[in-house]
Amino acid sequence: MTVIEFYDRVELHNIASTLLCAPDRVIFIGDRSKAMAKTVSLCKTVAASRGIEVDYAFQSVNKNRLNEIVEALEKITERYDDCIFDITGGSEVYLVAVGVLMERYRGKIQCQRLRFKNSTVMDCDGDGVYFEPESFEVSVKETVMLGGGRVKQASSVSLDSEEAREFHRDIDAIWACCRKKPSLWNRQLVTLATLCRQFGGENSLSYRFKRSSAEAYMKGRGNFLLSEEILAELLEKGLLTKLSLSEEITFTFKNHRVKRCLTTAGAILEWYIAKRLFDAKDKKGNPIYHDVEVGVTIDWDGDDRDEFRTYNEIDVFAMRGAVPMFISCKNGSVSVEELYKLNTVAEQFGKRYAKKVLVATELDRFGARADAVRARADDMGIRLIENIDEMPDAELNRLLSTLWSS
């Protein structure tokens, strides 16, 4: 199978046929030789990561000269008798050129268009013959690669082990505690994180120190808070053990994953949203999102040789087919600057298909600042899910299940 692709600035359009039908060769037609050469290199990398062998080539044409485009396409069609024209990308002039060929080679030209929002193939020549991909699924890693970067670090959401399943239960238990009083929860996490760094180190799970020493150390570093209400609930749920809040303070975290959620601001909201996305099912019981990652650090350059590097982190990154969702989670104060960061990363690595979402707790507490965030989110096309600490589970499920189509 030979696929003729019309070069497009949206890289997903350029590589779609490679990922979905694994053709023998792909030939790009466009007017930007350097850009097409870069796309060929990118396609080879992504194809190799899937174990797909494809021969790539490109031919430069004047995008404003219809006759030149038709002549180039005609030569390719004459050379290869298994051509399929993918008109997902490219300008209107290219589409006109394909129409000319369809008239000249009536009944012999295969033409199709891919629709990523609903994962379908359109049979544009109307003969009922078109390839049917097994799946439109593109991974988080591949999506970042298509934007010219790479995933430097991420945590996958899965249920592939008893440890992972246990962590999912712990996420629900921690969130049930957090959502009661998010502001108080954040203050408690600051205290725990500070004390853990000072008394025992980052890699320890068990801590023992004098209350007087803790109070003295915290003075000037923030409010010293050990909420008996919060800690007693964590003890009851088995997330902490060996808890004592007398003159000598002792506690032990259940494991390192739980410790991170109890000492890192915002971590539990990120994992809770990711878990709910991972659990989301359609009416047939099939997963809505096939790839869900947490704490995705993106290296924009994708090359260790670059001296000056640009990194960004997306709290939750989920994929529905080829549609990426970039989600920022804020369990507390939200600034307009966060919206700019989210928008910039989504535009680079998701282009026109990117879904941008901000999930926040207690947003209505911040008055004029919240109004500014709402207004700017609307301007940027960022979907806002606010006050989820008060949101019924059924409503949250509905919202998360439809993020990809919003």
Image (cartoon, grey):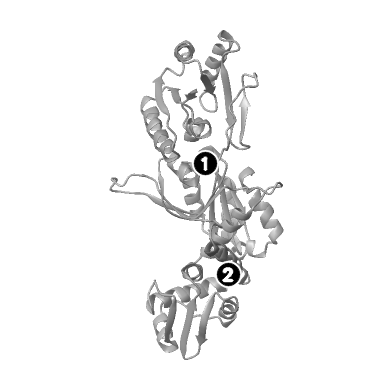
Q: Which residue is mark 2?
A: 174
Percent across and percent down for residue 55 are 41, 26
Question: Is 180 situated above or below 271?
Answer: below
Foreground disc of the pair 1, 2 = 1
Question: Is 24 situated above or below 181?
Answer: above
Percent across and percent down for residue 211 are 45, 87
Residue displayed at 68% across by 49% down: 285
- Name the residue at the top extreme: 104
Amino acid type, residue under disc 1 in the picture: Val
Classed neighbour count for the residue bearing mark 1: other residues with Cα under 10 Å, few (<14), some (14–19), many (≥20): many
Question: Is 370 situated above or below 130?
Answer: below
Classed neighbour count for the residue bearing mark 2: other residues with Cα under 10 Å, few (<14), some (14–19), many (≥20): many
Residue displayed at 55% across by 65% down: 167
SS at circle 2: helix
SS at circle 1: loop
- Using the image, tell me which numbered label, if any, was put on residue 332: none
* Quarter where residue 160 is shown: bottom right
Is residue 327 left or right of 201 when viewed as pictured? right
Amino acid type, residue under disc 2 in the picture: Ile
- Using the image, tell me which numbered label, if any, was put on residue 138: 1
Q: Is residue 147 visible?
A: no
Quadrant placement of the C terminus: top right
Q: Is residue 234 visible?
A: yes
Q: Nearer the viewer, residue 50 or 233?
A: 50
Percent across and percent down for residue 203 are 39, 71
Q: Earlier in the sequence, mark 1 or mark 2?
A: 1
Is residue 153 left or right of 157 when viewed as pictured? left
Is residue 366 left or right of 205 when viewed as pictured? right
* Quarter where residue 57 is shown: top left
Q: Nearer the viewer, residue 188 or 222?
A: 188
